[in-house]
Amino acid sequence: MDAYEFIKDAIIEGKFVPGMRLAEESLAKEMNLSRTPIREAIKQLEAEGLVIPLKRGVSVRHFTKEDIRQIYDLRTLLEGYAASQAAIHRTVDDLLKMEEANVFYEEAISRYVESDMDRLKDMVEVNQKFHEAIVAASNNEHIHFHISKVVVVPIVFRSFYWYNSFQLNQSLQVHKTILEAIKNREPERARIAMHEHIYQGRDHVLKHLEQIKNIHLLKEEVK
Amino acid sequence: MDAYEFIKDAIIEGKFVPGMRLAEESLAKEMNLSRTPIREAIKQLEAEGLVIPLKRGVSVRHFTKEDIRQIYDLRTLLEGYAASQAAIHRTVDDLLKMEEANVFYEEAISRYVESDMDRLKDMVEVNQKFHEAIVAASNNEHIHFHISKVVVVPIVFRSFYWYNSFQLNQSLQVHKTILEAIKNREPERARIAMHEHIYQGRDHVLKHLEQIKNIHLLKEEVK
DNA sequence: AAAATCTCTTTTGTATACAATGATATCGAG
DNA sequence: CTCGATATCATTGTATACAAAAGAGATTTT
């Protein structure tokens, strides 16, 4: 595995916590490399905003609730646009890929058991496939590049962890609405449905961040 | 000057032409550095998409007319959104900065003489100040990060080079419209005006690319 | 006791050295 | 003469070495 993937994954998974300084030497030792490729990987992560430069070296970026809100707003804008463009430019082949992703998504949901990490990861992946199929159909290669770089919010902030199967089925319904709009070549409907879809995800995340915060406050009180 | 800026500027200015391979050793010698910091700079440029990885090393990215179209579409989307949000969240201080930028812009236009490079650069800079003031007022820090990363199209593709003073004044008028909308807290009007503004820029660039292409075809015929 | 300064250690930033891999050129065969 | 195979060369990718700076800790001073 290469240094970039290794560090990025560690940050996303929450193994490297916000504010933590990335020590080049120890990273190098951990993955049997010299500092040179490590530094190059870090420079890439810096350009993506996952890591913040200090006077010397870098630390893992800290994301506030406000950051999450802003990032989701951006995703909404970009993916909403992608959906509307997909409704204009989609080919039959594009539709097939979206439909396939949705079938897998449906299967993943039906097999869903709470707090089964492996299945959760499957679901995240299949969900992404659907979104990627739409972006691919949008007739704008650059938007794909930018959506993928729109800061990959650490997985601890992702919503799937806390979805129950009712919410997942609701999410699947929205996927179907989006697909229908793209199939029927209705750009505005596709955009609005996508907006709604992502905003629901955002609200879900923010709600749970609030709950987590309350738990922390409770813990403080107990002390 | 640091390696990142140096290489980036060279690409934007057209000194390093598309397809050209970046030889680390010669770059290092040119700026009195070792290859290590050069490689790090290149990794950043790669993350931004200005440079494309080969099997070994990188080359300057080639932008087609289609790329330009897509990048401008993206900029329109992002800056249009920024303008609409600015209309909602702008403070008085934000407005002052926009107005100031526009005053300088007006001055720069009045002093404008065709093909005076220094004044062109001034104008580009002042224009950017206006756009940045809007983004800053949008209440979304992340959008600023992404607009700046939305591939910096090499300056050879920028429109200012070919504007005449009539077009520049028209551009100033649109700036004033946008500012007025933001001042009056009219998000949709601000967005639409910004859309129009950037699309005009895009069309202008695409038109001239067409002309340049024709000139090249003409040259081929002459041979 | 608190603050400040000085020293020492740790870690970064840069340079250089070495190994591995494409690219190029030359030589031979069809 | 052209196409292909092989060998050499140039340039990358990785490792290591060295110098400089930041941070930590201890000692001193107010």
Image (cartoon, coloured by chain):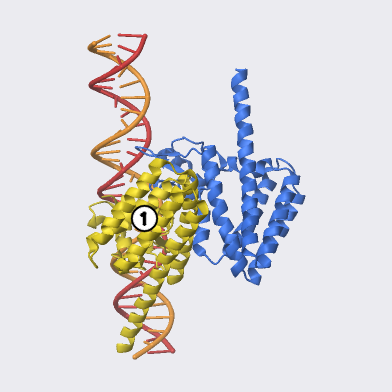
Chain colours: A blue, B yellow, C red, D orange
In the picture shown, does residue B139 fall above or below B73?
A: above
Chain on which label 1 sits: B
Residue at 63% across / 28% down in the picture? Answer: A215
In the picture shown, does residue A8 fall above or below B30?
A: above
Residue B124 percent coordinates (x, y): 31, 58
Q: Which residue is mark 1?
A: B42
When asked about the image quadrant of residue A95, the answer is: bottom right
Residue D7 percent coordinates (x, y): 34, 71
Image side of residue A139 versus residue A32, left or right: right
Looking at the picture, tell me which residue is in the foreground, A125 or B107.
B107
- Check the picture and name the quadrant holding the C terminus of chain A: top right
Looking at the picture, tell me which residue is in the foreground, A119 or B203.
B203
Residue at 62% across / 50% down in the picture? Answer: A198
Residue D16 percent coordinates (x, y): 34, 44
When asked about the image quadrant of residue B112, the answer is: bottom left
How many other residues sit within 10 Å of disc 1, few (<14), some (14-19) or many (≥20)? Answer: many
Tell me which amino acid carries mark 1. Answer: Ile
Q: Is there any visible trace of residue A168 in the rendered image?
A: yes
Residue at 63% across / 23% down in the picture? Answer: A218
Q: Secondary structure at mark 1?
A: helix
When asked about the image quadrant of residue A98, the answer is: bottom right
Looking at the picture, tell me which residue is in the foreground, A90 or A190.
A190
Residue A207 percent coordinates (x, y): 63, 37
Looking at the picture, tell me which residue is in the foreground, A128 or B180.
B180
Q: Is there any visible trace of residue A125 in the rendered image?
A: no
How many marks on residues? 1
Residue at 59% across / 40% down in the picture? Answer: A156
